[in-house]
Amino acid sequence: MLRVRSLFGFKIVLLLICIAADSAASSDADLEYLNSTLRDNFSNSRNHISNAVYKQQSRDFIIAEFRRFELEVEFHNFTSDVVGAGDFQNIIGVLRGKYFGTKKDQIVGVGAHYDTVIDTKGVDDNGSGITALLYVAREISKQRNREHTIMFLAFDVEEYDLTGSKVLLTDWLPVWSTTHWGNNQADFSPKGFIILDTILEYESGQMTQDLPPGSTDIFMFRDVYNSVTADNFTGDFLASIYRSVSDGHLNTAFKESWDKLEQREFEIETFALPFEDIASIPESQLAFLANFGRSDHFNFWLAGIPALFLTDTVNFRGNMTVCYHKPCDDLETMFKLENLQFLGKTSLALKETINALSPVLKDSSSGSAQDNKMCWTVLIICLFFAFKGFYNLC
Ligand SMILES: *[C@@H]1O[C@H](CO)[C@@H](O)[C@H](O)[C@H]1NC(C)=O
Ligand SMILES: *[C@@H]1O[C@H](CO)[C@@H](O)[C@H](O)[C@H]1NC(C)=O
Ligand SMILES: *[C@@H]1O[C@H](CO)[C@@H](O)[C@H](O)[C@H]1NC(C)=O
Ligand SMILES: *[C@@H]1O[C@H](CO)[C@@H](O)[C@H](O)[C@H]1NC(C)=O
Ligand SMILES: *[C@@H]1O[C@H](CO)[C@@H](O)[C@H](O)[C@H]1NC(C)=O
Ligand SMILES: CC(=O)N[C@H]1CO[C@H](CO)[C@@H](O)[C@@H]1O
């Protein structure tokens, strides 16, 4: 009797393990990784003038993480007259897809800047984005056999006229694509990049969200305007900003992933910009629309590459109305539990988006989903033998 009971105990333990493995795989992001990475490695100034030492440590951390995830690490070292004296560095992590170097390869990427302005700790701007990028790189690299190549871009000196991403696109990317696509440059056409900048701040209270001046009389985001006013200006959403035609597929993929996740209190608002070509924007709308071009995605648009911009709306929300580019963009102000959970949902949705845009190949044998199937199979076999009376077989 004792023996039977202890064997039954084993099956219950196995059942619990299977359930735990399943829920870990599907529902929540690993908040501990987000917490420790943001707190330990991206919570102080990362500016070449005010804190070059911490900035270098953050760089080293990005490089070490990319290597740990077994990405191919590339460096784009540069100097810049726009920024001034200093040695700057974009860091690129690549996971080659099955079609690498061919016409069929449609690269998907995630980008975020890791530098800050002089006077801020930059926990939200943009410690949050680079932390989410590393989280996604870690998760994605666990299943390495992919259809399309995946790129992780850590930009330097965004805070100086978006310089890091600009020179990456004009100087580094053409050289890199020529190296791998050779004379077939016309075949090099990325599916698109998702740019993260300032994605931590979440507010559940009313009257915590501003809209850019002009929102009431320029009616291009009617749905967003109605939704935000209906919520009495609650800063509880992630903003997904894109050009409706060129980047629509990226928004659709991200929103589908977002909508599948729990935590409904974290909402999403999508801003479909009604232009493709920057030069075609009417003069009267320029000042208003400039609010939507405030990060590295803008350089991708100028380069004719699809890009989606995700943000918490920065200085239009909650504490960031005061703390944007200020010392209080720090752990004390920004590191609220709900902010971390909000970052978790964004990170998880992003991971699922990349999984959708560059699917894991069917014959791939690695990964947690497989492990879980194995777990349930063993349990079912055990129960079957137990049912048949062969207790000692399992
Ligand atoms: C990142 O943070 C961890 C924990 O504090 C620390 O051990 C590590 O040295 C940091 N990495 C860098 C490059 O600063
Ligand atoms: C860029 O800088 C890194 C050091 O961070 C160095 O290892 C690498 O060789 C440099 N790359 C080039 C192309 O100069
Ligand atoms: C909106 O929120 C503010 C601040 O909480 C409150 O004073 C006001 O009554 C609210 N308005 C509506 C229509 O709920
Ligand atoms: C952040 O927002 C909270 C809630 O509105 C407020 O109590 C706190 O003083 C703000 N902190 C800073 C540094 O502005
Ligand atoms: C992050 O982790 C630290 C150490 O475990 C903990 O004290 C802190 O409450 C966590 N922060 C959040 C926002 O969960
Ligand atoms: C998203 C965002 O806030 N980007 C800002 C980062 O900092 C630069 C330089 O100060 C601003 O121009 C961007 O608007």
Image (cartoon, helix red, strand yellow):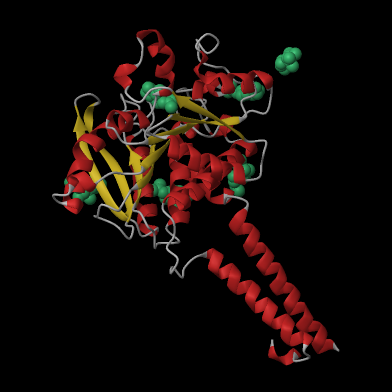
Image side of residue 40 versus residue 333, left or right: left
Q: Is residue 318 visible?
A: no
Quadrant placement of the N terminus: bottom right
Q: Residue at x 58, y 36 (%)?
A: 335
Please, which residue is most extreme toward the left here? 183
Q: Is residue 45 visible?
A: yes
Please, which residue is most extreme toward the right here? 1
Q: Residue at x 36, y 41 (%)?
A: 192
Q: Indicate the position of residue 385 as horizontal and vertical percent values.
A: 72, 87
Q: Is residue 279 above or below residue 111?
A: above
Q: Is residue 383 above or below residue 215?
A: below
**Between 375 and 333, which is closer to the camera in this rendering?**
375
Q: Residue at x 59, y 38 (%)?
A: 342
**Between 64 and 216, which is closer to the camera in this rendering?**
216
Report which quarter residue 89 is drawn in: top left
Quadrant placement of the C terminus: bottom right
Q: Is residue 215 above or below residue 186?
A: above
**Between 174 and 24, which is closer to the camera in this rendering?**
174
Q: Indicate the position of residue 217 as horizontal and vertical percent values.
A: 52, 8
Image side of residue 104 versus residue 27, left or right: left
Q: Indicate the position of residue 298 as horizontal and vertical percent values.
A: 35, 28
Image side of residue 121 versus residue 228, left or right: left
Q: Residue at x 67, y 39 (%)?
A: 264
Q: Indicate the position of residue 392 as horizontal and vertical percent values.
A: 72, 91
